[in-house]
Image (tube, grey):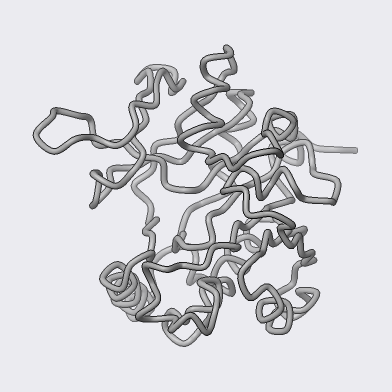
């Protein structure tokens, strides 16, 4: 018999790791995809898979593009990481949302979507429970950003957590509430049917604002847990230093037993 908790778990995830990472070329030398950039001696994607497995996501789809063969050769079918890995090579580069729309496999009723160029140390079980409780079409993890001027702002109702707007990126000198999308979502499968496949689209700038305008219920899951992108050499260095410090201190669920 299914338990209440089993209905609140999310067992499938899609990791978006198809980008070339031109801003990180000083680190990658255009010889490895961002998913294989090492953080404290391990590929970034290995950290993602550990986190997903620990929180019950056993079926992981990697949406790949640039140097997909290198990722496939390194991670195989996922047995070494305790997950089932499947690869969805993008026939066309159609942005973060378009990558998911081109997945040829059946998607679960609810799934996590993780950006492959962020380091995440989040209690995914708690986020999945929030998503199940709210029952929205999507739940976005949001947090204050250390670089808000190139981040996507989110407005929400403080009482319910329901998203009320996507004002885009703030302009210097204007007032704004520093609450940004962190590149980690829990979504319903039905949302994917609203992603066009004839043009490039981005979740934060195109799909979520369009779904909000159409009346869909979207929620912001506010968290101060560690989520940091490493899309530039400076941010990469910071993430490596932060992760080394967390390892040394043995803090955070990502580094637990």
Q: Position of residue 246 (x, y in %)?
A: 35, 72
In this rendering, is residue 184 above or below 162? below
Q: Position of residue 218 (x, y in %)?
A: 53, 24
Q: Residue furthest top?
A: 215
Q: Position of residue 13 (x, y in %)?
A: 68, 52
Q: Residue furthest bottom?
A: 41
In this rendering, is residue 89 above or below 145? below
Near-viewer residue (135 or 154): 154
In this rendering, is residue 201 above or below 136? below
Q: Is 168 placed left or right of 88 in the picture?
A: left
Q: Residue furthest front?
A: 198
Q: Is 100 placed left or right of 237 in the picture?
A: right
Q: Quadrant of the C terminus?
A: bottom right
Q: Residue at x 38, y 60 (%)?
A: 229
Instruction: Using the rendered view, name the quadrant where residue 252 is placed.
Output: bottom left
Q: Residue furthest right?
A: 1
Q: Residue at x 47, y 54 (%)?
A: 122
Q: How many marks?
A: 0
Instruction: Using the rendered view, name the quadrant where residue 33 is placed.
Output: bottom right
In this rendering, is residue 221 above or below 81? above
Near-viewer residue (120 or 155): 155
Q: Residue at x 45, y 31 (%)?
A: 220
Q: Quadrant of the N terminus?
A: top right
Q: Position of residue 189 (x, y in %)?
A: 74, 35
Near-viewer residue (142 or 24): 24
Q: Residue at x 77, y 64 (%)?
A: 87
Q: Is 241 placed left or right of 130 in the picture?
A: left
């Amino acid at each position: 018999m299914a338990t209440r908790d089993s209905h609140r778990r999310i067992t499938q995830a899609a990791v978006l790791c198809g980008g070339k990472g031109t801003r990180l070329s000083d680190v990658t030398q255009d010889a490895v995809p961002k998913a294989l950039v090492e953080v404290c001696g391990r590929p970034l994607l290995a950290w993602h898979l550990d986190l997903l497995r620990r929180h019950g996501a056993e079926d992981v789809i990697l949406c790949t593009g640039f140097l997909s063969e290198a990722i496939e050769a390194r991670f195989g079918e996922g047995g070494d990481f305790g997950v089932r890995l499947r690869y969805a090579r993008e026939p066309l580069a159609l942005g973060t949302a378009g990558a998911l729309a081109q997945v040829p496999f059946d998607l679960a009723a609810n799934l996590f979507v993780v950006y492959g160029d962020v380091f995440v140390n989040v209690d995914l079980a708690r986020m999945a429970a929030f998503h199940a409780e709210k029952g929205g079409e999507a739940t976005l993890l949001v947090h204050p950003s250390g670089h808000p001027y190139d981040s996507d702002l989110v407005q929400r109702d403080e009482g319910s957590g329901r998203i009320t707007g996507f004002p885009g990126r703030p302009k210097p000198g204007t007032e704004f509430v520093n609450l940004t999308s962190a590149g980690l979502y829990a979504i319903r499968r039905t949302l994917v049917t609203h992603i066009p496949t004839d043009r490039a689209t981005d979740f934060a700038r195109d799909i979520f604002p369009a779904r909000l305008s159409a009346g869909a219920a979207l929620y912001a899951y506010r968290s101060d847990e560690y989520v940091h992108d490493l899309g530039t050499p400076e941010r990469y260095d910071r993430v490596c230093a932060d992760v080394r410090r967390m390892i040394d201190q043995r803090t955070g669920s990502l580094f637990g037993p």
